[in-house]
Image (cartoon, rainbow, N blue to C red):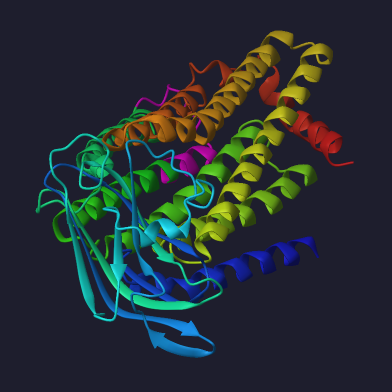
Amino acid sequence: MVQQSKTNIYLILLSLFLVLFPHFTSALFRQDHIIINDRRQYILLEKFGFLPGGKLTITVNECKYEDSGTWKNMTKDPVFGFYFIVKKTDDHQEIKQMQIPCQTAKVDTVNFKQLDESCPKTISVSIGQRQDLGFGSPGLYFVYFANCQKESSVSLKMHLNFNNQETNNLSAGDIPLPMIYTLLSIIYFGIIIYWIFGFIRKPRDPSVIHRVNTIHYLMTIFIIVKFLTLVCSASEYYNLQLYGRPRGWNVAYYIFSFLKGVMLFTVILLIGTGWSFLKPFLSDKDKKVFMVVVPLQLLANIALIVVDESTPSSISFVTWYELFQLIDIICCGAILIPIIWSIKHLKEASETDGKAALNMNKLRLFRQFYLTVVAYVYFTRIVIMLLSRTVRFDLLWICVILTEFAALLLFTTTGYSFRPTADNPYFKLSHDDDGNEGIQMKEMKSEEEP
């Protein structure tokens, strides 16, 4: 019954992904915005980091508003238009929280471009050399659409085109990303070769003990998926830089990123439970954690794809983003539970079974693994978020490097700690362990599955 329920959950999530997938593959790039019957006073369209020589072009194809149940073309009165806020960091709050009244737009301000009856209309903004954070100076631009007709709905179709120095379509903080992801791909490719030929492949010398377990093959598959995700990221940003569109690489990225996200939490959970090298089974408690984490991680990856393919102007954008953050926090907390259980079990075993030295080595290893995972979660979910709000707009790529470095550190330390070699202290057994291993597994299973 439990297995059937688990299967139904996976089928529902998989069906949801397959239903949404055609939308992802055919969706317009984020520069295209369609707003239909929207009553919000301020609508965030996009944010983009401009360097000197950059240019922003807004082409409005349709612009209507509702007045007493009748849809009309936008005119000078009431006021509709685009409001620009320029910042040096990504610490911008919602425009409502900044208490900028809509009446400001009626004043002839430089950072407001009004729509009138001449729609379709094109609005161009050129970025100069000024450094005063004024309109037209380099910085992180938040582009809003302002609806100053209270209780009125608007419908628009527009295209936003962003350029940095004519030949670069990436935001200032993303310009180094194609090279960064390319270098990371090379590093991971080297790690894959070293891992497979150094640990996974069976040694030619028959006297060398080879302890490759199922979890090691899963770790190999995961690191390959991570490598393919980085390759797709590099290709996607390279095409965005040159052509302004991912040209299909976003689809490949979503597929491998989806697999990577699910496999990361799965592998950490399996290592935390000690499955395949500490015990050849999963207890009922372990299975319950899996039934919670894996479906949630599937849903989190779907939410992340929706966020990436949606525009900030979408009403559901914030909802999906907050859903992703909530699920991600839950999953990060849940993956620590099996590690805590394994630490508790090894601590009790070291005090009772007469093999204190062996179990203390395992206990030390699991504690190290626990601290590594906690540090990774804290750094990537909290420190990076705070850093992204304080670092200068053209240096946001530093957050990507630090996030990837933290992931690389987690993978390499975990792989080295649980490497399948005879000299690994974790796999060293006492002289009578081989004969009693089956008995120990039965005892452990009876303890964990009452």
Name which quarter of the figure residue 435 lies in.
top right
Q: Residue furthest right?
A: 450
Evaluate whether residue 276 shows in this view: no
Q: Is residue 94 left or right of residue 188?
A: right
181 or 110: nearer the viewer: 110
Q: Position of residue 196 (x, y in %)?
A: 35, 36
Q: Which quarter of the figure is the C terminus placed in?
A: top right
Residue at image coords 14%, 51%: 168
Q: Measuring from the top left, give residue 408's x and y in whole percent.
A: 39, 31
Going 49% across and 29% down the picture, which residue do you hit?
A: 383
Q: Nearer the viewer, residue 442 or 232?
A: 232
In the orientation shown, which residue stands out farthest toward the top?
Answer: 357
Where's the N terminus, which quadrant?
Answer: bottom right
| 198 vs 50: above or below | above
Q: Nearer the viewer, residue 314 or 402?
A: 314
The quadrant where residue 369 appears: top right
Residue 179 shows up from this direction: yes
For residue 270, what is the image quadrant? top right
* Residue 117 % position (x, y): 28, 81
> In the image, is 139 to the left or to the right of 64?
left
Whether residue 219 is in magenta: the answer is yes
Vertical placement of residue 58 versus 209, above or below: below
Q: Please say if 133 is above or below 348.
A: below
**Residue farthest to the bottom?**
70
Q: Which residues are magenta?
A: 205-221
Q: Is residue 227 magenta?
A: no
Q: Residue furthest front?
A: 107
Measured from the top left, where is residue 240 in percent x and y? 21, 56
Q: Is residue 221 left or right of residue 32?
A: right
- Write the residue at 23% across / 42% down: 172
Residue at 46% x, 66% y is 314
